[in-house]
């Protein structure tokens, strides 16, 4: 057997005015094919902008005629492409769609030249969601990068920043809305409660149940064990195969009881006869079995919070987990008994669930639950995608309104009308061949606390801020739904003291955690108590934006 090492080929040298471009895609061929036209349109517009600055785009990987798209479709493919990328070249990661960050992360970690992540500004083609995930992953990995976004890549500010990056290799955005907790006034009572809750968690400890890590390549969503254990939370690594098996052990009668409970509460299931395109009763029945199975497994292992991978893996065996996730996050939910029937598990409480096994959201959600419970505030919380934002086309408000949207982890308590304001529609077949219903609704008007845990410079960090969920006219809500994903629950959110560009420049994830409070004063108190708890757990904490009235936190 030969022990010789093959000769490593040198990558082609990029020209002085060349800008290399890569496009990370989905793992699923159907998604890459469906989304390629939008990506191609974006790259054309971006190429024109780069050319106007005196440079030219050179794609680092070709369009694949046999697959009918030009995305990097796996980590393996990404590594192969980066072996031929000039490590000193200017490099743009262009995203018009959701993407798997680990397809490009290995190459970006070792790239020495300037890196720019760029996204379109669209709800239909969520490049900004994919880019925020990649930005959070690069931040965690300690990779230097710059970032830009634009609706059409023709506006003066985008062109000015692009030219600066092309010449200087970096750009910075203003983030003066970010205030270190040390500069924020926190009442002694709020600080003491937060510190007490932190000490309790570290002393008594808690278990986070994880049904397989690393959903959709989200490196930023994995907290290293030592960092998590320092907060008092320990991982129980569970398997999706165990969830599948346990679901098959649940009887039809038990599952029908869950469905009957939801029907009696007013949940509307939008069903049809064709399982390939419609939500069917059989799909719902299996989702009800998964719900019971998830609760029982959480009880078996003593989990205080759980996360189901959501897409890859189970999608080939079962309907989607959305209905399960939203139901778990609600205090008022169908009772689940132990296998021997003697106990109701987690009675009267939510079992906080973090969508897509986002461990940062899981820790955040557990903290929110404990803070809000101690304060007598609504305990239901969820993550959302930061999907998009736009001005109100109906002009019912002059505020800039964000679309927070997630596939179904939202608890009905967040909706107008609760369970009666909730419906369930089939997940898109492009992603979910076995269907499954979402938990759909319009988030009620109210005061919310938003937050995000992320990793930077080897440390857990938390950003928190205040916002309001507002009501928009029906036609405007429908416009936003149709521009994004109409099967999913929606929140119309107005951030206090944070502009669009400030949010994009600072936020380190595609996800954002939200929870309601009873009123403005209670929301402020919940935010500060949670901030104090996070700091006592060893996190670097910042408050973003202002109070509702525009007043500073300092």
Image (spheres, rainbow, N blue to C red):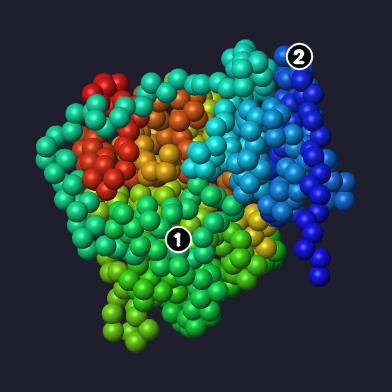
Q: Residue 205, how many percent across, how many down? A: 26, 62
The tally of labels here is 2
Element on which disc 2 rests:
loop
Is residue 268 toward the left or the right of residue 281 in the image?
Answer: left
Q: Residues within 10 Å of mark 1 (few under 14, many from 20)?
A: many
Q: Residues within 10 Å of mark 2 (few under 14, many from 20)?
A: few
Considering depth in this image, is 276 or 538 the residue closer to the camera? 538
Which quadrant would residue 107 be assigned to in this image?
A: top right
Residue at (29% x, 58% y) in the render? 232
The label shown at residue 307 is: 1
User: Comparing marks 1 and 2, which lies closer to the viewer?
Assistant: 2
Considering depth in this image, is 477 or 17 the residue closer to the camera? 17
Name above or below for residue 290 compared with residue 307: below
Residue at (75% x, 44% y) in the render? 83
Name above or below for residue 223 compared with residue 543: below
Is residue 422 toward the left or the right of residue 65 in the image?
Answer: left
Considering depth in this image, is 47 or 38 the residue closer to the camera? 47
Which residue sits furthest left?
A: 189
Specify which label sits upstream in the sequence, 1 or 2. 2
Which residue sits furthest bottom?
A: 340
Residue at (28% x, 80% y) in the render? 343
Q: Are marks 1 and 2 in contact (CB under 8 Å)?
A: no
Q: Residue 298, how many percent across, how many down? A: 38, 71
Q: Can the viewer see residue 322 in this picture?
A: no
Q: Residue 514, how many percent across, how many down? A: 37, 44
Residue at (30% x, 30% y) in the render? 180
The label shown at residue 54 is: 2
Is residue 505 toward the left or the right of residue 520 in the image?
Answer: right
What whole-number distance in Å separates the C-alpha atoms at marks 1 and 2? 48 Å
Locate the N terminus and report the quarter of the image it occupies.
bottom right
């Amino acid at each position: 057997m030969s022990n010789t090492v093959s000769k490593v080929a040198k990558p082609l040298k990029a020209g002085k005015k060349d800008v290399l471009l890569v496009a990370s895609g989905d793992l699923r061929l159907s998604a890459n094919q469906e989304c390629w036209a939008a990506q191609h349109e974006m790259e054309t517009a971006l190429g024109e902008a780069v050319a106007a600055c005196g440079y030219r785009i050179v794609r680092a990987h070709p369009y694949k005629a046999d697959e009918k798209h030009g995305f990097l479709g796996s980590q393996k493919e990404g590594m192969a492409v980066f072996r031929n990328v000039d490590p000193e070249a200017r490099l743009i990661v262009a995203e018009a769609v959701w993407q798997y960050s680990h397809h490009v992360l290995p190459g970006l970690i070792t790239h020495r030249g300037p890196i720019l992540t760029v996204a379109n500004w669209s709800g239909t083609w969520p490049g900004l969601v994919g880019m925020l995930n990649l930005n959070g992953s690069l931040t965690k990995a300690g990779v230097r990068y710059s970032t830009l976004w634009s609706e059409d890549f023709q506006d003066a500010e985008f062109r000015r920043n692009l030219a600066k990056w092309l010449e200087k290799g970096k750009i910075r955005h203003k983030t003066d809305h970010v205030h270190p907790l040390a500069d924020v006034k926190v009442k002694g009572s709020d600080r003491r409660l937060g510190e007490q809750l932190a000490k309790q968690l570290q002393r008594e400890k808690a278990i986070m149940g994880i049904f397989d890590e690393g959903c959709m390549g989200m490196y930023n969503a994995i907290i290293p064990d030592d960092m998590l254990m320092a907060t008092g939370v320990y991982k129980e690594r569970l398997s999706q195969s165990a969830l599948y098996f346990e679901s098959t052990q649940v009887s039809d009668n038990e599952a029908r009881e869950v469905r009957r409970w939801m029907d009696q509460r007013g949940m509307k299931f939008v069903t049809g006869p064709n399982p390939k395109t419609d939500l069917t009763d059989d799909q719902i029945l299996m989702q009800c079995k998964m719900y019971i199975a998830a609760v029982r497994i959480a009880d078996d292992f003593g989990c205080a919070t759980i996360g189901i991978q959501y897409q890859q893996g189970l999608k080939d065996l079962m309907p989607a987990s959305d209905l399960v996730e939203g139901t778990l996050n609600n205090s008022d939910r169908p009772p689940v008994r132990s296998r021997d029937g003697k106990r109701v598990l987690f009675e009267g409480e939510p079992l906080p669930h973090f969508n897509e096994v986002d461990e940062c959201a899981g820790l955040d959600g557990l903290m929110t639950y404990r803070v809000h419970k101690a304060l007598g505030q609504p305990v239901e919380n969820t993550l959302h995608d930061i999907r998009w934002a736009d001005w109100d086309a109906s002009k019912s408000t002059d505020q800039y309104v964000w679309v927070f949207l997630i596939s179904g982890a939202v608890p009905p308590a967040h909706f107008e009308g609760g369970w009666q304001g909730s419906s369930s529609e089939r997940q898109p077949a492009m992603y979910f061949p076995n269907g499954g219903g979402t938990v759909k609704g319009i988030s009620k008007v109210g005061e919310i606390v938003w937050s995000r845990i992320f990793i930077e410079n080897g440390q857990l960090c938390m950003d928190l801020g205040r916002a309001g969920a507002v009501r928009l006219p029906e036609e405007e809500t429908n416009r936003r739904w149709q521009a994004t994903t109409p099967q999913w629950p929606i929140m119309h959110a107005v951030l206090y003291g944070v502009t669009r560009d400030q949010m994009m420049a600072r936020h380190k994830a595609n996800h954002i955690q939200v929870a309601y409070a009873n009123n403005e004063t209670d929301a402020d108190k919940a935010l500060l108590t949670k901030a104090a708890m996070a700091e006592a757990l060893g996190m670097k904490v910042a408050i973003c934006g202002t109070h509702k009235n525009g007043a500073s936190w300092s």
